[in-house]
């Protein structure tokens, strides 16, 4: 039986940002990062929900819109 792989938060964020940029398809990102396309889509969706919660003020974290824009560029 194989051991489950654990991914760092930095890895998850970089995959999600790559998917959010839209330069590559989910399939291309999955092949490059050795992930299943469902994992890439889930990370992308989690990032979208997290950022929307930040901007709506439903989170304990507060970021300026400029910081979010910097992350997306």
Image (spheres, rainbow, N blue to C red):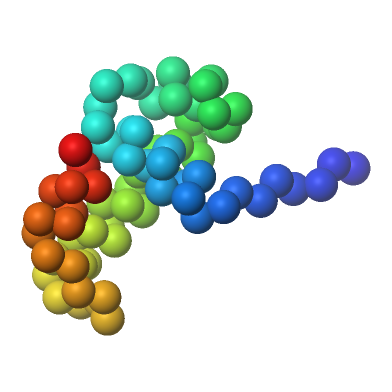
Residue pictured at 32% horizontal, 52% vertical: 47
How many dots with numbers? 0
The residue lying toward the viewer, choosing from 6 and 1, is 6
Image quadrant containing the N terminus: top right
Q: Position of residue 70 (x, y in %)?
A: 18, 47
Q: Position of residue 28 (x, y in %)?
A: 44, 18
Give the quadrant of residue 63: bottom left
Residue pictured at 41% horizontal, 48% vertical: 13
Q: Position of residue 51 (x, y in %)?
A: 23, 59
User: From what the image shows, is residue 14 above or below residue 49?
Assistant: above
Asked whether, in this view, residue 1 is left or right of residue 70, the answer is right
Give the quadrant of residue 58: bottom left
Q: Is residue 38 visible?
A: yes
Q: Is residue 43 visible?
A: no
Residue pictured at 12% horizontal, 65% vertical: 64
Asked whether, in this view, residue 4 is left or right of residue 59, the answer is right
Residue pictured at 52% horizontal, 22% vertical: 32
Image quadrant containing the C terminus: top left
Q: Position of residue 55 (x, y in %)?
A: 13, 65
């Amino acid at each position: 039986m194989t051991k489950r792989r654990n991914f760092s938060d930095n890895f998850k964020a970089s995959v999600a940002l790559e998917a959010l940029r839209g330069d590559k398809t989910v399939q291309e990102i999955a092949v490059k990062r050795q992930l299943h396309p469902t994992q890439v889509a889930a990370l992308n969706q989690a990032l979208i929900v997290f950022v929307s919660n930040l901007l709506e003020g439903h989170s304990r974290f507060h970021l300026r819109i400029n910081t979010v824009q910097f992350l997306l560029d």
